[in-house]
């Protein structure tokens, strides 16, 4: 997999001693998103190589409630991209406060207009979408503003039982 870090290393290797001393460390930093993609928690698959605007993303969280599951997302990039966000649906049945059991996703960057100002903008990329979907299983997991209210209330009532139900869904639907 080609990443920013590997490209920079390769480019530095080609330059050899010609590398400028003025090159700052910030050009060599690897973003959090690149790290997530590199460590293998996200994989992209194109079911039809002739339709590059339709792809599937598999997120395999390596920590938290959803660790050990493999969650499939279907992404369709519309003709009006990048003025409008891609359409994303979760194909894996999941017990999650921000994803319904029918696959609807509550992630502000997937909204054309967002009250919090973090919605879609033409400067966003598909990499942001991948990062956002991956983060729904860790730091963007939000019980305070749920789409699946029943799951959020379940967590509030009984965290242990919530974890058990998440594990049951993983065993049944996300292997």
Image (spheres, grey):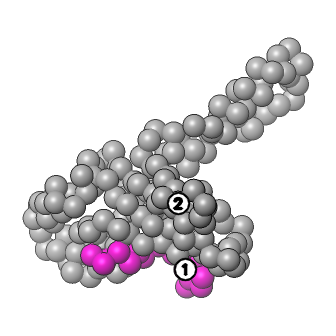
Q: Is residue 169 magenta?
A: no
Q: Is residue 113 positioned above or below 13 on the image?
A: below
Figure quadrant of residue 150: bottom left
Relative image position of residue 118 (x, y in whole percent): 58, 74
Is most of the magenta stretch helix, strand or loop?
A: loop
Q: Are marks 2 and 1 in contact (CB under 8 Å)?
A: no
Residue at which label 2 appears: 48
Q: Is residue 107 magenta?
A: yes
Relative image position of residue 22 (x, y in whole percent): 87, 29
Please state if 25 lies on the left or on the right of 153 as rendered.
Answer: right
Residue at image position (48%, 58%) is 47
Asked whether the viewer can see residue 97, the reply is yes
Residue at image position (37%, 60%) is 72
Please state if 171 lies on the left or on the right of 61 as rendered.
Answer: left
Q: How many marks?
A: 2
Q: Earlier in the sequence, mark 2 or mark 1?
A: 2
What range of the chain is rendered magenta? 100-119
Q: Viewer-proximal residue, 23 or 5?
A: 5
Relative image position of residue 8 (x, y in whole percent): 72, 32
Figure quadrant of residue 105: bottom left
Give the position of the N terminus as an image quadrant: top right
Q: CA distance from mark 2 to mark 1?
A: 26 Å
Q: Is residue 148 positioned above or below 174 on the image?
A: below
Asked whether the viewer can see residue 64, the reply is no
Q: Viewer-proximal residue, 84 or 116?
A: 84
Please state if 47 lies on the left or on the right of 104 as rendered.
Answer: right
**For the residue carrying disc 1, how many other residues have a C-alpha within 10 Å: few (<14), some (14-19), or many (20+)?**
some
Q: Viewer-proximal residue, 84 or 47?
A: 47
* Residue 54: mark: none
Relative image position of residue 97 (x, y in whole percent): 30, 73
Residue at which label 1 appears: 111
């Amino acid at each position: 997999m080609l990443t920013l870090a590997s490209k920079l290393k390769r480019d530095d290797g080609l330059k050899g001693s010609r590398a400028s001393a003025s090159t700052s460390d910030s050009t060599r930093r690897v973003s959090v998103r690149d790290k997530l993609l590199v460590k293998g928690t996200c994989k992209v698959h194109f079911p039809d190589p002739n339709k590059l605007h339709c792809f599937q993303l598999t997120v395999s969280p390596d920590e938290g409630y959803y660790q050990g599951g493999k969650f499939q997302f279907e992404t369709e990039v519309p003709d009006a991209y990048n003025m409008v966000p891609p359409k994303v649906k979760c194909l894996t049945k999941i017990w999650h406060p921000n994803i319904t059991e029918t696959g609807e996703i509550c992630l502000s960057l997937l909204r054309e207009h967002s009250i919090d100002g973090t919605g879609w903008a033409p400067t966003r990329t598909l990499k942001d979408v991948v990062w956002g979907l991956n983060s729904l299983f860790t730091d963007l997991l939000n019980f305070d503003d749920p789409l699946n209210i029943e799951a959020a209330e379940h967590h509030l009532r009984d965290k242990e039982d919530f974890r058990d139900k998440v594990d049951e869904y993983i065993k049944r639907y996300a292997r």
